[in-house]
Image (cartoon, grey):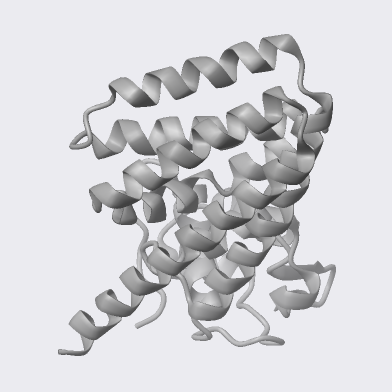
Amino acid sequence: MLLEPLKTDSLVEAFVKRFEELILSGKITIGQQLPSERELAKTLGVSRPVVHDGLIVLQQKGLVSIKPRHGVVVNDYRNQGSLALLQSLIDYNKGQLEPHILESLLATRKLIELETVQLAAAKRTMRHVKEFKAIVEEEKTLDTGDIATIVEVDFKFHHLIALASNNFVYPLLLNSFKKVYTNLTYQFFLDKKVIYFVFSAHEQLTNAIIQKDSTHALHIMTLLLEHGQLHLRRYIKKQQQKEAL
């Protein structure tokens, strides 16, 4: 049975999550009309206000359209989904991204980071320089077995590049990717050789940014991203092979 009573502290969030999963999995199809609020409330064992508020959230994400006197219809989220849907796509399937979603995210990250590192080299302030140096020095003291801290410091470095770009939107976009970014980098940081490569690249990037050498900064960032993508794809391939056994 697709719909069964909800039991949780946050019923609206549970409602939204349930229907996100049903829609993204295709169990509820594009163009399908949902039951009335009254029917949904009765089936799920919640109040109508919970159903109404949940449907509003789904509409804001672009997953459904609420049409007065016509009910609620499931949208094609590829055409009508909003930025609010991005985190849902990332979180879907317990963090295991579909290949085309993963490739899209990697391409988007590369686009953002290659742009921000050039801007950072051109627009960084002395405060940014001080912060870059502090992160590089912190990385030298980290225990290579403390993967959780390494992941956080790595993200902090890339987020600082976005901040130094002097573009208000780029840091916010990077924050949108933080959960999937840190989940995935945790896996390939288990290889200590990757840690040494990344920290070395961070130091080279810091020097290029200090010298305002955008060309060299772009080159190092390109190598760093390609290195990361290569290891990430290898890791995912191994995981898929394990699951197939």
Q: Is residue 149 above or below residue 48?
A: above
Q: Position of residue 32 (x, y in %)?
A: 66, 87
| Residue at 73% from the left image edge and 61% from the top image edge | 59
153 or 48, which is in the foreground? 153
- Asked where in the image residue 205 lies, by quadrant, the reply is top right
Q: Is residue 116 at all visible to an observer of this figure? A: no
Q: Is residue 36 left or right of 24 when viewed as pictured?
A: right
38 or 25, which is in the foreground? 25
Q: Is residue 69 left or right of 244 when viewed as pictured?
A: right
Q: Quadrant of the N terminus?
A: bottom left
| Residue at 39% from the left image edge and 51% from the top image edge | 185
Q: Position of residue 43 (x, y in %)?
A: 44, 70
79 or 106, which is in the foreground? 106
Q: Position of residue 97 (x, y in %)?
A: 46, 70
Q: Is residue 147 above or below residue 7?
A: above
Q: Is residue 162 at all visible to an observer of this figure? A: yes
